[in-house]
Image (cartoon, rainbow, N blue to C red):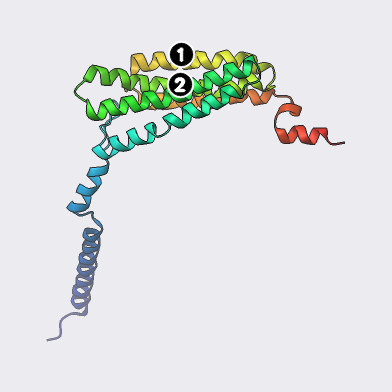
Amino acid sequence: MEPPRCSLRGSWISRRRSTREGASDASTRDSWPTEKQIKNTARFMNHRVPAHRRYQPTEYEHAANCATHALWIIPSILGSSNLYFLSDDDWETISAWIYGLGLCGLFVVSTVFHTISWKKSHLRTVEHCLHMSDRMVIYFFIAASYAPWLNLRELGPWASHMRWLVWIMASVGTIYVFFFHERYKLVELLCYVVMGFFPALVILSMDAAFSLPLARALSARP
């Protein structure tokens, strides 16, 4: 007796579907990282932590943090010294000092913090204070990096106010880190972004003749 065609077609479809599912499962298993790959990745980077907790770097990350920050201490000192000796007036000297201290302080504080965090992690209080200092110095570095531009360029009426406002913003950021360190990381990120971009708004009050060297060159043409 010949079996019904619907039964044959149904069994053929079910076999084909199971074959596809088996192949899909096999390809999925092949795409999964192996235990060896997971261990190798864990050597270089730990898993993400919740927003209210501090990330703990691996040994490789500690070494990289120390090396990449310490590498720039000597060039920062040499560059800052060069700016100081090339200064022609009081404003240039002051700007060179401010920028140099901000730049050197950033790399020195970060290097000390990462070194203590790596080799002396049992000093919890010292590490915590240095971690806060590492975050605070970023605000002052941003303010110091704007000092030459705000002090030495013709930036319009806004610049005279921004010269002091940028340091007020750095002080507010420092106070925020002191009271809310590692508590609201997204807010801290937004503070850095605002601190980095807000002083640049003084370009809106610049005279076109002093806005860019190209503008000055174009205005000098007959």
Q: Which of the 4 image quadrants contains residue 32?
A: bottom left
- Residue depicted at 45% across the width and 21% down the height: 139
Mark seen at residue 128: none
**How far across and how far down the image is residue 35, in percent?**
17, 52
The amino acid type, in three-letter code, at marker 2 is Tyr
**How far across and how far down the image is residue 188, in percent?**
40, 24
Residue found farthest to the right: 222
Quick check: 118 left or right of 212?
A: left
Count of marks, rendered view: 2
- Kindly identify which residue carries mark 1: 171
- Residue depicted at 23% across the width and 44% down the height: 42
Mark seen at residue 139: 2
Label 1 – label 2 distance at C-alpha: 8 Å
- Residue depicted at 26% across the width and 33% down the height: 49
Residue 46 is at least partly visible in this image: no
Which quadrant, please, contains the N terminus?
bottom left
The amino acid type, in three-letter code, at marker 1 is Ser
Residue found farthest to the bottom: 1
Which quadrant, please, contains the C terminus?
top right
Q: Which of the 4 image quadrants contains residue 5?
A: bottom left
Residue found farthest to the left: 1
Residue 123 is at least partly visible in this image: yes
Q: Earlier in the sequence, mark 1 or mark 2?
A: 2
**How far across and how far down the image is residue 179, in percent?**
34, 14
Within 10 Å of the Cα at label 1, are there few (<14), some (14-19), or many (20+) other Cα atoms?
Answer: some
Nearest the viewer among 174 and 184 is: 174
Q: Mark 1 near mark 2, Cβ–Cβ under 8 Å? A: yes
Q: Which of the 4 image quadrants contains residue 93?
A: top right
Nearest the viewer among 199 and 78 is: 78
Quick one: SS at disc 1?
A: helix
Quick one: SS at disc 2?
A: helix
